[in-house]
Image (cartoon, rainbow, N blue to C red):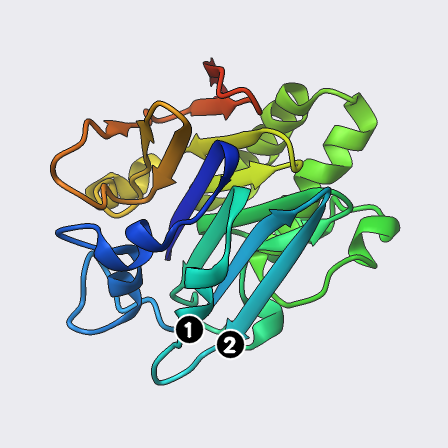
Amino acid sequence: MCRLFGSISRKPTGISYWFFDARPHPFKDFSEPPPINGGPHDDGWGIAWMAGDKWEIFKEGKREKYDFSMINGLKSKLFIVHLRRASKGFDTTKENAHPFQYKNWVFAHNGGVEGENLLKHLDVTYQAAIQGKTDSEIFFLIIMQFYEETGDLKKALQKSVELVKETGYRALNFLLSDGRSLYAYRAVNPNFEAKNDYYSLHYLRERDSVIFGSDPLDDDRPWKSIGLGELIEVSADLELSSHKII
């Protein structure tokens, strides 16, 4: 149960507006009381950004209050940011904070899957890559395993979603990037339809960037909701396409 933010732009750009100044809800507000949409999401946070041709990642475990000042100095063509509200039983350590990285891929998730059931489907190579103790990281590595088997991300996502739906899930909202393109996907278990507002995912297309957020962060721009089973793909030149993964 978390909040997601992502951006992809034509040239290195900062995200301080979205973090601090957007109204009515800058992204940082979802980590703080009073509760906003299921919050506060204060069990850890992390940010991944492209620095040249490689990812940089900063993560923290649970804190009484986070210092997000580092955001002001960052510029990149790609960002993925995650505010965590831990599932029951999961430690609120830095290792369990998102985003997760495997090779050149970075992933952040809002939802829940049956991690123990999924773990049985991971080859030992991918099991050895696990850094924390979350179901989300296992879900990510399932996607990576199928991707390396098929060489096709959409086929890998389809196989991953089918497997997760067999083994159990609450929601599969995620942001995923290979450092060039940015992918956003949304799926919610029908048994959790009452929480569809919580398991939301939106995007905003602007002239030189595309922004993603679990929630629209300001009121004066045309945010669009991502549909259930919809994968939004944004390329480095901001070409946007929609695919069904069900």
What's the residue type where badge 2 is placed?
A: Gly
Which residue matches tag 2? 61
Classify 231 as above or below 41: above
Is the Cβ of the residue at disc 1 closer than 8 Å to that at disc 2?
Answer: yes
The Cα–Cα distance between marks 1 and 2, rounded to whole angstroms, is 6 Å
Can residue 112 be seen at all in this image of the molecule? no
> Relative to residue 13, is residue 222 depicted above or below?
above
Mark 1: amino acid: Asp
Mark 2 burial class by Cα count in 10 Å: few <14, some 14-19, many 20+: some
- Furthest residue toward bottom: 64
Residue 97 % position (x, y) = 54, 66
Q: Is residue 105 above or below residue 159?
A: below
Quadrant hosting residue 237: top right
How many marks are shown on the rendered structure? 2
Q: Which residue is mark 1?
A: 43
Query: In what element is the residue under mark 2?
Result: strand
Which residue is painted at 45% across and 56% down in the image?
A: 82
Q: Is 78 on the left or on the right of 144, as rendered?
A: left
Question: Which badge, 1 or 2, is on the more N-terminal residue?
Answer: 1
Q: Residues within 10 Å of mark 1 (few under 14, many from 20)?
A: many
In the rendered image, residue 123, in percent from the top left (x then y), is placed at 83, 46
Residue drawn at (23%, 30%) of the image: 223
